[in-house]
Amino acid sequence: MNGGAGVALVAVSVFAWAMYADWKYATNDRLARWLLPIVRRWGRRYGLAAFLLSLAGLALFGVAEVAGYFIARAMGDPRWSLLAVLPAMLAYAPVTFAMAPIDTLGFQQWRESLRKAGAGDSEQRWIARLGGLPALLGLSVMISALFPIFL
């Protein structure tokens, strides 16, 4: 499958997986429970810690993307890069959907997950805002990673 249909199929599948993972495994709440103790180790710089951890997730996805392109070059077909890129998308998408400030409701849900994990109002605000920036960029990077594969 080539062209826009391939991009759409993979993008919709990854989106559906992220929604299912949140429903089935409560990824927002799990991520908040995992993230909060880590960023609290940074003291009052918890927003910076959330930003750097989110950026690290984006960097790991980038490594998988580059690995996929090397696989594709070796195999002679860009679709082979899905061997590395698709699993990375399936792992990274629930994180980005939890943290990225896509809309007001998503932002509120992420803050609510942080609140349930024990974060105060200031922690919720800074973690959600600063941690959400690389996650929002991660969404666009995931979608843009599909274009060289299918187009």
Image (cartoon, rainbow, N blue to C red):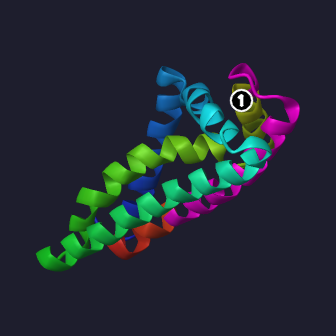
* Dominant secondary-structure state across the stretch colored magenta: helix
Asked whether 16 or 123 is in front, the reply is 123
Q: Secondary structure at mark 1?
A: helix
Q: Position of residue 148 (x, y in %)?
A: 38, 76
Quarter occupied by residue 2: bottom left
Q: Quadrant of the C terminus?
A: bottom left
33 sits to left or right of 146: right
Q: Position of residue 52 (x, y in %)?
A: 61, 56
Q: Position of residue 25 (x, y in %)?
A: 48, 23
Quarter occupied by residue 13: top left
Q: Position of residue 48 (x, y in %)?
A: 72, 54
Q: Residue at 80% of width from left, 37% of height from top? A: 123
Asked whether 57 or 52 is in front, the reply is 52
Point out the stretch of residues depicted in magenta: 115-141
Seen in the picture, residue 114 relative to 48 is either above or below; the reply is: above
Instruction: Residue 127: say if magenta.
Output: yes
In this figure, what is the number of numbered marks? 1
Q: Residue at 43% of width from left, 66% of height from top? A: 62
- Using a 10 Å C-alpha cutoff, classify the residue at mark 1 as few (fewer than 14 neighbours), some (14 to 19) or many (20 or more): many
Quarter occupied by residue 4: bottom left
Asked whether 56 or 41 is in front, the reply is 41
Seen in the picture, residue 134 relative to 23 is either above or below; the reply is: below
Asked whether 83 or 130 is in front, the reply is 130
Residue 65 seen in the figure: yes
Q: Which amino acid type corresponds to the residue marked 1 in the rendered image?
A: Leu
Question: Circle 1 sits on which residue?
Answer: 114
